[in-house]
Image (spheres, rainbow, N blue to C red):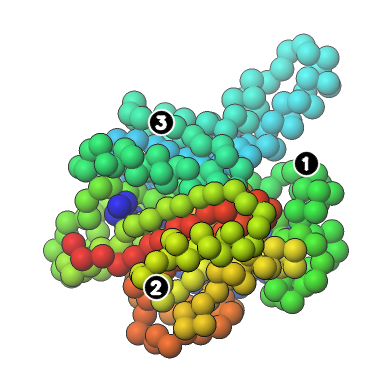
Amino acid sequence: MLYIHQYSCISPQHTFGSIDLETLVPSIDNRLKALEPAYAGIPPGMLRRMGKCVKITVGAAMPLLADHPPADGIIIGSGNGGLEDCIRFLDQIVQYEEGMLTPANFVQSTANAMAAQISLLTHNHAYNNTHVHRGLAFENALLDAWMQAVDNLDATLIVGGVDEISDYHLNIETLNGTFKADPCNNATLYASTTKGGLAGEGAAMFRVGGRPVKAEAGTTEPGSGAGAEAVQADKTYAVAITEVDLFHSTDPAYVQGRLKGFIGADTPDLILTGENGDPAFKPFYTAAEAANTTVARFKHMSGESPTASAFATWLAVHLLKTGAMLPEHMIKHAGPSDKGFRNVLIYNAYQGRQHGLIRVKRTPE
């Protein structure tokens, strides 16, 4: 399993620095844009040249590295990488007739630019990998980190999921039906009957390892900087990602069977589903629901993106680590438990074809 040592998230909601999940930041023009912080710790000259995707990734990762030696690996999942800089570079090819092009846009547009920039800023020469698998990019990054942790239980790794909205991507995916063409706001998203979801972006980053963090009760976890969760260490439990599964299917019946096999006898007390307001995909999420389990939704907070499951994982870890109450606006129906959650199942279906399952649990140290 992957023990969560620290976690950090830059998203369209108040998830970085002072966390406020009760207040729902509204969408604008069918978009949920990331609330970018001041990016302390990134040299201004370097920050100026960074594309948005790189900025939010590095900004979310730096608090996890502030008081630590370089991690033993940096692993990022991204469905699209830095499309905004990619389009800028392609526009320059036309504008300058393949003449003197600005290399910064090309460098920042590659999918591995996010992990590379973290490495450059922290002088990290260890394992560095980026997974670009559309809606399963983050799940593949988790499996990669899992394998690294199995090989070396004492290793610590940075793993995360990131995606951005570019105007180009928004236009193409709206025409494709991924995003809604008609006006819709996130407060009423799940009552919508039109095709598509709301466009979203953000970066969720985790410092993980094969062993739990060792800390004395009543102290904060080491290395919790601004933006990273500083929680009271409790020697009685840790939080870990205990299972990951991913598969392709367009058959709700197959998905339901796969879900039942994944859950087995270990029934979760909270299911976080990636329901996104598109009625075409609702049967998949209905198949994941259980009558005696709290079911909550998160895409009115994060929006739809290939790595939205990274935001859901951040939510699950935050709830389990802090014992925070689940905001009312997330709850689809409440289960019998009112004593906090210990076993969370995350289910996300990207475009009704790619399916990811992640279990996050409180575990004994």
Circle 2 is placed at which residue position? Answer: 267
Q: Amino acid at mark 2?
A: Thr
Distance of mark 2 from mark 3, alpha carbons?
A: 35 Å
Mark 3 crowdedness (10 Å alpha carbons): few <14, some 14-19, many ≥20:
some
Tell us which disc is closer to us: 2 or 3. Answer: 2
Relative placement, left or right, of 194 versus 361 is right
Quadrant location of the C terminus? bottom left
Q: Amino acid at mark 3?
A: Asn
Residue nearer the viewer, 148 or 323:
148
Mark 2 crowdedness (10 Å alpha carbons): few <14, some 14-19, many ≥20:
some
- Residue at the (44%, 50%) spot, across then down: 205
Q: Amino acid at mark 1?
A: Tyr
Q: Quadrant of residue 250?
A: bottom right
Residue nearer the viewer, 58 or 235:
235
Q: Secondary structure at mark 3?
A: strand
- Residue at the (21%, 66%) spot, across then down: 364
Q: Which of pointers 1 and 2 lies earlier in the amino acid sequence?
A: 1
Circle 3 is placed at which residue position? Answer: 128
Identify the residue at the far left of this view: 216
